[in-house]
Image: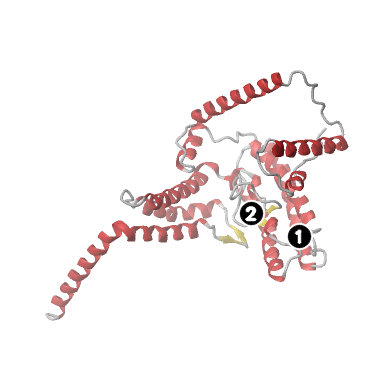
Amino acid sequence: MSLKRPFTILLCMLCSFQWGTSQSQSETTMSYESLEMLYKEWRSFEEPPSYQGAPDYRAATFDSRQATFKALQAGLNDFTITNWPVSKQVDWHILFAEMNGYDFNYRILKPWQRDPAFYKTVWMNRSDVPAHEGPTHHALLEIWQYTFPLDKESKEKMVKELQVIPVLNEQAKLNLTGNAKDLWITGIRDIRTQVNDLESLKRMPGLAEDKKLIKTIAKAIVATKDFVKWLEKQAPTKTGPSGIGKENYTWYQQNVHLVTLTWEDEVLLLKRELSRAWTALKLEEHRNRALPQLVAADSPEAYQELAAASAKNLLAFLEQEDIVTVKDYFKPALAAHYGTFVP
């Protein structure tokens, strides 16, 4: 014992010295590596656990995971980043914003509880923003990411993604306890659209010959139609507001999007932009006051003719005014966005 004790003390002193050295080093490099580790932990946590083959958005699951989230958040707040290069400070702020976004969804937005559209799984087209504009769940089926006809691996992947739909729809009936009237009404529309999307999926090249895929799609259609009926039955009971309030909006902008503006600031900016738009419109109307009034299309044929003529006029304007070099693909690209006639 007498021989071991001095050795133990010496070892502790050596470890303490080494720890102190590494701690001082961590002020410049190791702390950022720790941030990277925390980021990986956070991203792993943000992916919800699975329940019966679908992401788990049940209230009890969220509540049971809250302590872990608070620990991750506290770990982030323990960092001192004032001496870091700006590029690394930015990474800390991105993680800060992501955690605040999770916290805001848990406390305020609760899309899994208030918004039926949260449970839309099938997305035919790519969003014009990096992810999606509104809240979405973690098991989306992004049809635009597939190339048809599908290879074997893609078929297996799509089957698994389609199999989530019936399970998630049943879970949604338990989770959707909110009272947001407007969100409920628009959400029904989005879920109903999924039926049409699934029907169109069956007509994709090569899918009709795959019995397993067609059967899986059919089950997803039945489950989605049943979900729509359930939503429509519940709709008359939804009478509450869908908004989150100015204070919550301001907190979200400042702590999630990291925009320093308040609700009132943004309203003021929008009013100014609206005034500029009206002014520009009136000046343009005055400049063209000698021209005849535009005539609205009154049929699908007239609409298509007007759309094609307008696109041709736009391309000619871009070319003649040396705004951009008009490429061959401009015309078909524009044609894909003509839209359709609305009486």
Q: Which sits in the foreground, 85 or 74? A: 85
* Badge 2: residue crowd in 10 Å (few <14, some 14–19, many ≥20): many
Amino acid type, residue under disc 1 in the picture: Ile
Where residue 280 appears, x then y in whole percent?
64, 24
The answer to whether residue 331 is above or below residue 69 is: above
Amino acid type, residue under disc 2 in the picture: Gln
Where residue 341 appears, x then y in whole percent?
82, 37
Residue denoted by label 1: 217
The answer to whether residue 7 is above or below residue 24 is: below
Q: In which quarter of the image is residue 331?
A: top right
Query: In the structure shown, which secondary structural element does the residue marked by tag 2 occupy?
Result: helix
Horizontally, residue 146 falls left or right of residue 50, namely: right
* Badge 1: residue crowd in 10 Å (few <14, some 14–19, many ≥20): many
Q: Which sits in the foreground, 25 or 87? A: 87
Lower position in the chain sequence, tag 2 or tag 1: 2
Residue denoted by label 2: 171
Q: Which sits in the foreground, 323 or 101? A: 323
